[in-house]
Image (spheres, rainbow, N blue to C red):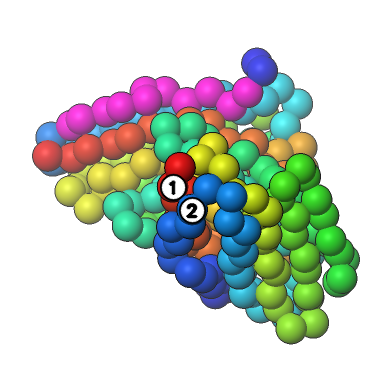
Amino acid sequence: ILNVEQSPQSLHVQEGDSTNFTCSFPSSNFYALHWYRWETAKSPEALFVMTLNGDEKKKGRISATLNTKEGYSYLYIKGSQPEDSATYLCAFDTGNQFYFGTGTSLTVIP
Amino acid sequence: GAGVSQSPSNKVTEKGKDVELRCDPISGHTALYWYRQRLGQGLEFLIYFQGNSAPDKSGLPSDRFSAERTGESVSTLTIQRTQQEDSAVYLCASSLAGGHGELFFGEGSRLTVL
């Protein structure tokens, strides 16, 4: 079983604040790193799939970076809004299997 | 269909009963995954199908758990003689090819074993 860790476990921020969280993963058997957003009572939705060391992806106010050599990825949210409240999951993709972290639960306070 | 569909969305059962959970993946998606999330824990891998074959069953927690997939489409996860520790949200996901693209998840089946 591969160890994928996310921190912090939970986070409360004020509306308008920027925030970031971390996903740590093994540096071997890497194929891709995925980020998913899981809102309450909905299904997880993909945010980013990153494959190359140094990759940076952006979607609106959310962006992510990838360092495969040291085994971490950061997810950034700029100017958090209440609708950003969700659990953010990262998944380490070996090419035929996905290993999920336990997620970071984000609450944005209006 | 437009998305991954799971049924039932909620199931309450008594300890010792058998349950079946169903997953309809997105049409054309060859890879199908079952995960579960128990209260306070992360997503736990159960089983993975490529087509109708299951190359990785390593996550099935005991021989009470089984799964099958037919027609490279619908999958059924069966839990026999349910125990209270089986209570969880069971999520199904599909992708175009195993481990090569994003996962598309269903909304899950919440199982409560009394």
Does residue B4 show up magenta in the picture?
yes
Residue at screen point 76% across, 37% down: B96
Q: CA distance from mark 2 to mark 1?
A: 5 Å
Answer whether residue B59 is visible to the viewer in this image: no
First in sequence, mark 2 or 1: give its number.
2
Label 1 neighbour load within 10 Å: few <14, some 14-19, many 20+ = some
Q: Position of residue B76 (x, y in %)?
A: 46, 31
Q: Which residues are magenta?
A: B3-13
Residue at screen point 37% across, 25% down: B9
The residue that mark 1 highlights is A109
State the SS at label 1. Answer: strand
State how many labels appear.
Answer: 2
The chain identifier of the residue carrying mark 1 reads: A
Q: Position of residue B25 (x, y in %)?
A: 61, 28
Circles 2 and 1 in contact, beta carbons < 8 Å: yes
A6 sits left or right of B114 in the view: right
Q: Nearer the viewer, residue A25 or A66?
A: A66
Amino acid type of the residue tagged 2 in the rendering: Gln
